[in-house]
Amino acid sequence: MTRKIIYIVDDEPDICQIIAQQLNQHGYETRTFQTGQQASAAIHRRKPDLCIIDLGLPDMDGISLVKEYCDTSGMGVIIISGRGSTTDRILGLEFGADDYLAKPFEPRELVARVNSLFRRLEHINHVSHSGNKDRKARFADWIYDPNTLTLYHQTQTLSYELSSAEATLLNRLLQAPRQVLSRDQLLHGFADPFDRSIDVRMSRLRKKVETDPKHPTLIKTIYGAGYILTCEVSWQA
């Protein structure tokens, strides 16, 4: 099996080394970078499976890297940061990060988060190839391709690459249309237990699929119960 490639972006070499050693011991291939520009250049040359990004970089705010790559590359992103405020966590998730881990943290916890993220991606891939192989979901004005985690508008030239977290949520909604799914059902399998994470990720989904995200009609909130996809879903080749 090809080893997953993980880029570690942190201005502290010691932290990079500790994280890399832990990940290497668990079978991952790693590369480390101390600046955002170094990482950005490397990502353009070869996209990794996952990028672990510190927000406090010397040449740029790490959130700039998160914002640049979450919606365009399809790679996983985990933020690590000493800025553990709720605002920073929400901002990172809003820009599409898959997870957020505040410093200081145990390296083993980060490895657990990485393993969880890749299991989530493998689950998405498994769902897309079991029963719906080479098929796309058509719902409302949208077509979703689970093989590429991409949304296409049926009549407009719009397309979005989803993060693994967004794809997980959408997959669960598409597998159970017109059914109320609780927060626990939707959150199951996410490494980040942060209570607002489901709301932030659902908000990102709505900004893509809803005509008016502030007044959603496609993915509705059932207060006290969860969320529901209000339309029918058909799976077609």
Image (cartoon, rainbow, N blue to C red):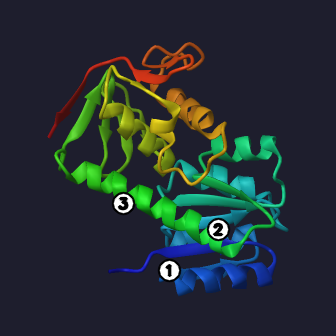
Q: Label 1 is placed on what type of residue? A: Tyr
Q: CA distance from mark 1 to mark 2?
A: 15 Å
Q: Nearer the viewer, mark 2 or mark 3?
A: 2
Decide if residue 71 is on the left or right side of residue 175: right
Give the residue number, with chain letter if any, for mark 1. Answer: 28
Give the residue number, with chain letter if any, for mark 3. Answer: 122
Decide if residue 142 is on the left or right side of residue 193: left
Q: Secondary structure at mark 1?
A: loop
Q: CA distance from mark 2 to mark 3?
A: 20 Å
Question: Within 10 angstroms of label 1, few (less than 14), some, or many (20 or more) residues?
Answer: some
Q: Label 2 is placed on what type of residue? A: Glu
- The answer to whether residue 41 is seen in the rendering is no
In which quadrant of the rendered image does the N terminus lie?
bottom left
Q: Secondary structure at mark 2?
A: helix
Q: Earlier in the sequence, mark 1 or mark 2?
A: 1
Give the residue number, with chain letter if any, for mark 2. Answer: 109
Decide if residue 87 is on the left or right side of residue 69: right
Q: CA distance from mark 3 to mark 1?
A: 15 Å
